[in-house]
Amino acid sequence: MRHRLIPEGRDATRPEPGARQRAGSGVTMSTNALSRRSVLKGGLLSLLAGNCLRGSRAQANDLRVGEMAPPATLVTLDGQRIVSRDLTGSVVILTFWATWCAPCHEELPLLSRYATEHADDGLRVLGFSLDTPDELPLVRKIARTLTFPVGLLTNSSAPGYGRIWRLPVNFTIDRSGRLVEDGWKLRKPVWTAERLEQVVTPLLRSAS
């Protein structure tokens, strides 16, 4: 399964701004249906990328497997605040996704089932959505199908993992709070049942 790359300053599934119908040609460009919301979002992402890209990449490059994972705080859709470092003793998966990410729609149900099967083994999954607040109704709809907490990244905090430039991307933390798997280093970062068994299940079998 191929993951989606998110060009800097662009929504991954929406057409590039600026394209118009060519006068008199009868050819409609793919961006003819571009919404005003998409234009505003693209502009906002460009601004954020320009201001934060260098520092965010440096933070992501500071990730070291085997060392303590950077803290992340998820503010859930119902306002609960969950701090990853408060979950020491559990195996933690940080998953970053969006409603417009096609591979995420396959990965999320798989991850949800796995989380249910291993809840008693000390597994915690925190879901960070890259959607904007105006897409909250769709985020809530998907969240109701999942067994792990979900929140918007815009309301949450995970600066130590860098700018999220592709989706999905995941980070796995062991019971002692150390980073076990860095999603940026994976060529095929989407979870599969086989990879969950290879990476996460052994961590769950180990004592805290």
Image: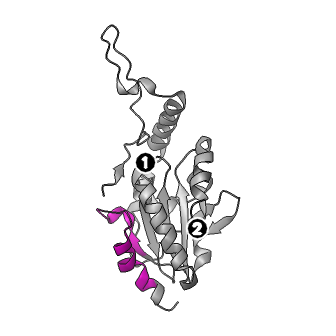
Q: Is residue 169 magenta?
A: no
Spot the residue most to the top.
24
Q: Nearer the viewer, residue 164 or 51?
A: 164
Residue 17: image quadrant is top left
Q: Are marks 1 and 2 in contact (CB under 8 Å)?
A: no
Classify 37 as above or below 59.
above
Residue 168 seen: no
Q: What is the three-letter code of the residue carrying label 1? A: Leu
Determine whether, in the image, residue 148 is placed left or right of residue 193: right
**Residue that label 1 marks:** 53
Stretch of the chain drawn in magenta:
180-203
Residue 147 tag number:
2
Q: What whole-number distance in Å separates the C-alpha atoms at marks 1 and 2? A: 33 Å
Mark 2, secondary structure of its residue: loop
Q: Is residue 197 magenta?
A: yes
Q: Where is residue 84 drawn, in percent x and y? A: 57, 71
Spot the residue most to the right.
79
Q: Nearer the viewer, residue 136 or 130?
A: 136
